Amino acid sequence: MMPGVQEINIYCDESRHTSDPSDAYMVIGAIACPRERKRDIVHEIHQLKGRYKSQGEFGWKRISPNKKEFYLELVELFSRDQHLSFRCLVVDRNTLDHDLYNRGDPELGFYKLYYQMLVHWLRGGCAYYIYLDWQQNREQHRFSELKHVLETKLSGKAKIHRLEPVTSHNLPPVALTDLSIGAVGYVWNDRAGSAIKENFCDSLSKAVGLRTLKTATSLAEPKFNIFHFTGR
């Protein structure tokens, strides 16, 4: 590694891309942190899990009233740690024309959206290790193809040292991403009926300085970036 090049881990996940069609908005997002800080952040999360006796996996679907304090502590952990940042892409699935733009292949369209979420976020002079939550693809080359197009676009700027699928239960930062995109998707799709999830969404928006999660931030927003994609 060249001196002065910062190594950054990015932990990706997606929400509502195959769920109830009444949920118009899908969300693709990621948590980023300096590679050297990953171990400390995971250690802090494990400490919280021990303190609140919340063992096993955590994530958006596992939020429950009896674990409220644990999940609100995770919000606090994210908001106070200057090394953690989040970005997501929100898109109305009803506006995607896969026949016209993706050769009739929704899977190709899905990874094009991943590209859009990442390419405007990666900074020149940094080296990235990108982890996507594993899922079964019809075409097995999707991950390597995404890495290739990112490398091509960012050639001479950012480096992509790794882009690979992982299982979320092994990586607490992926679970943090799952929480954030779950909250964004909940609000954008006007979901209601869960007091604990509504409380989590409100707490998260306040913690990151937003009036609501149903918003589009500026492209340069460094901490909690919401990109409303209205392209093809």
Image (tube, rainbow, N blue to C red):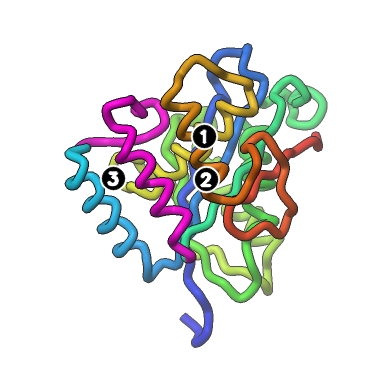
Decide: is 163 above or below 190: below
Mark toward the start of the polypeptide (1 vs 2) = 2
SS under mark 2: helix
Q: Which residues are magenta?
A: 55-82
From the viewer's perspective, is the residue at label 1 or at label 2 nearer?
1
- The answer to whether 99 appears left or right of 46 in the picture is right
Res 154 → quadrant = bottom right
Residues at badges 3 and 2 in contact (C-beta under 8 Å)? no
**Which one is nearer the viewer's eye here, 137 or 65?**
65
- As shown in the figure, which amino acid type bears the numbered disc 2? Phe
**Which one is nearer the viewer's eye here, 183 or 25?**
183
According to the picture, the residue beneath numbered tag 1 turns out to be: 201
Where residue 71 appears, x then y in whole percent?
Answer: 36, 39
Q: Main secondary structure of the magenta part?
A: helix
- As shown in the figure, which amino acid type bears the numbered disc 3? Asn
Where residue 121 appears, x then y in whole percent?
Answer: 64, 58
SS under mark 1: helix
Q: Residue at x 44, y 62 (%)?
A: 81
Q: Residue at x 60, y 34 (%)?
A: 27
According to the picture, the residue beneath numbered tag 3 turns out to be: 170
Q: CA distance from mark 3 to mark 2?
A: 19 Å
Where residue 188 appears, x then y in whole percent?
Answer: 64, 28
Mark toward the start of the polypeptide (3 vs 2) = 2
Q: CA distance from mark 3 to mark 1?
A: 25 Å
Where residue 29 appears, x then y in whole percent?
Answer: 56, 43
